[in-house]
Amino acid sequence: MPRIIYHLDFIKNNPDIKILIGCDTKKSYDQTMAGINHGLLSMQPIMELAGISMDRLIVHKHVYAKEVYFPMEGGCQDPVYNTWQILNMRNYFFNKLKITKNDQYLNKPVMMLMKRSSSAKHTRNSHDLVRQWSDEFANKILVSLENKFPKYRVVLFTDRNETLMKCFECQIRAFSEVDVLIGIHGAGLANIVYMKPNSAVIEIAPYGNDGRCLLGGGPFSRIAAVMAQNYMIHHPPHNEYKWITREMVSEFNIERFLLHLQSYLASINRL
């Protein structure tokens, strides 16, 4: 989407030109199509806000054309190669929604907790119980954050909030007001592109040996660098995890996380 928005005038001025999008081919056709369909579902509200019809898309096909336009080169999941496109997309949506700096800076700073849920239709990888929390566990974290950091107004962003999940504009506005974001590794963290500079991003990483969860190597730490945000990653030790397979959720040591978070916020003068 940052590349599409970057060339928006060209795309709108040439309505006959199609937009080719694809997806990594998985082990089975059904897995491939599941990824594509979920991606299209995610793109639709953004395309609508940008004023582009979904009919312009050619999805995951071999194409023969007399003339092809390539956007600027960029690596998969690497925002650094797409810095200007990302910043341009942010500015485009902020201008369209009339979001100003005065709207972003509220009287009481906002700390947001993002929650992934089991069997939530708006979140993929529902089989991945290590990244999903029960409502009860999320509420424990929320209350602990409120008690530990009274300076902040602590809010919950959950994939079970149908109104919010269906409103892309609402999500942009919500993240534009966040000073401290806490979320487990997942696509929802891409919304940090709408957070203000010098805000704080805390990624909870359940995979100790995953390159996507390495400081400076994962996509979200690199987006944070592009957006001039402070970034922290928390790896709960394996022996501090609790897997509840029946409910497809997990839990970790909240107290250890709060100590790490407190130390981090103090180091960037956010307490």
Image (spheres, grey):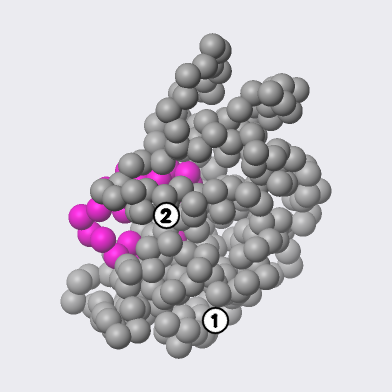
Residue bearing mark 2: 34
Please tell me whether mark 1 sits on a helix, a strand or a loop. Answer: helix
Compared across the picture, whether 246 is left or right of 47 comes to left
* Extreme-top residue of the structure: 66
Residue density around tag 1, few if under 14, some if 14–19, many if 20 or more, within 10 Å:
some
* Image position, residue 82 (x, y; %): 50, 32
Residue 90 percent coordinates (x, y)? 65, 42
Tell me which amino acid carries mark 1.
Answer: Glu
SS for callout 2 = helix
Circle 2 packing at 10 Å, graded few (<14), some (14-19), many (20+), is few
Quarter of image, res 134: bottom left
Q: Please give the range of residues in magenta.
A: 201-224
Residue 260 visible here: no
Q: Which residue is mark 1?
A: 146
- Which numbered marker is on residue 157? none
Q: Closer to the observer: label 1 or label 2?
A: 2
